[in-house]
Amino acid sequence: MRGVVNACYGSAVSERAAVLVDRCMADPAKEHDISLVTRQLGRFPRGMVAVGARCICGKPLAVVTRPQLDDGTPFPTTCYLTSPEAVKAVSHLEANGVMREYNELLAADDTVCEAYMAAHKLYLAFRHELAARLGDSEEHIAGTSAGGMPTRVKCLHALLAQTLVMGSGINPIGDLALRRIQGEFSPGVCRCTTQIES
Ligand SMILES: [Zn+2]
């Protein structure tokens, strides 16, 4: 099937996605992490297969969710932001009209626009790789990434999650959002408040 993948995304993108999936799957969802994320979200994280990014204290910041939940529900938001501090910080940006600014940037700057398209393709390739490994169907989410990609900025939470899971230099809007909220949230500064009963 590798040939089919290459035809869809290009071999370099597929290779990069496979490396990212390897890295994430090396940190599979453990009982302790699932309990923490349940606390963070206030609900059970269905389909959580791995922790995609951690705070320096070790708590999950974003998780990797499988493309298809156990009951068959398609789930497009593969990189999902769970840190309440990050969620809050990004919500402040959205409330302050930053999405409009980023949409204008996307419309005006070809370099950002191209990088955003590449981030979209990598997101799809990442999910495709995950789907192949887990045997999940992508039937209802094929071509759909997250956060409004590839042409709009609709959800900064989803874009920041991609930046946290895949690293900076991949999603230009997620990177901008992360820089902008550093006074409130940074993966390198623990401000975690979620506790778990031991
Ligand atoms: Zn922390």
Image (tube, grey):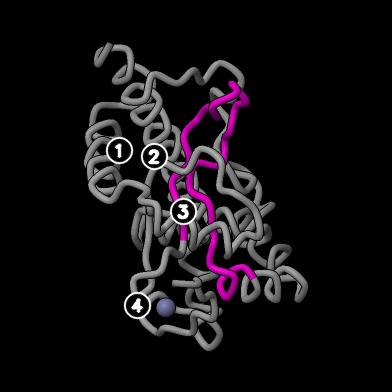
Q: Quadrant of residue 159?
A: bottom right
Taking the image as shown, residue 78 lies to the left or right of residue 29, namely right
Q: Quadrant of the N terminus?
A: top left
Task: Tell me, for residue 122, which label it has, or none.
Answer: 2
Q: Quadrant of the C terminus?
A: bottom left
Q: Which residues are magenta?
A: 62-87
Looking at the rendered structure, the secondary structure element under dot 3 is helix
Mark 4 — residue?
Answer: 57
Disc 3 and disc 2: Cα gap in Å? 26 Å
Q: Quadrant of residue 169?
A: bottom left
Does residue 11 appear in the picture of this structure? yes
User: Residue at the front extreme?
Assistant: 198
Amino acid identity at mark 1: Ala
Whether the residue carrying mark 2 lies under 8 Å from ligand 1 is answered with no
Amino acid identity at mark 2: Leu
Going from N to C along the chain, the mark reached first, 4 or 2, is 4
Dot 3 surroundings within 10 Å: few (below 14), some, or many (20 or more)?
A: many
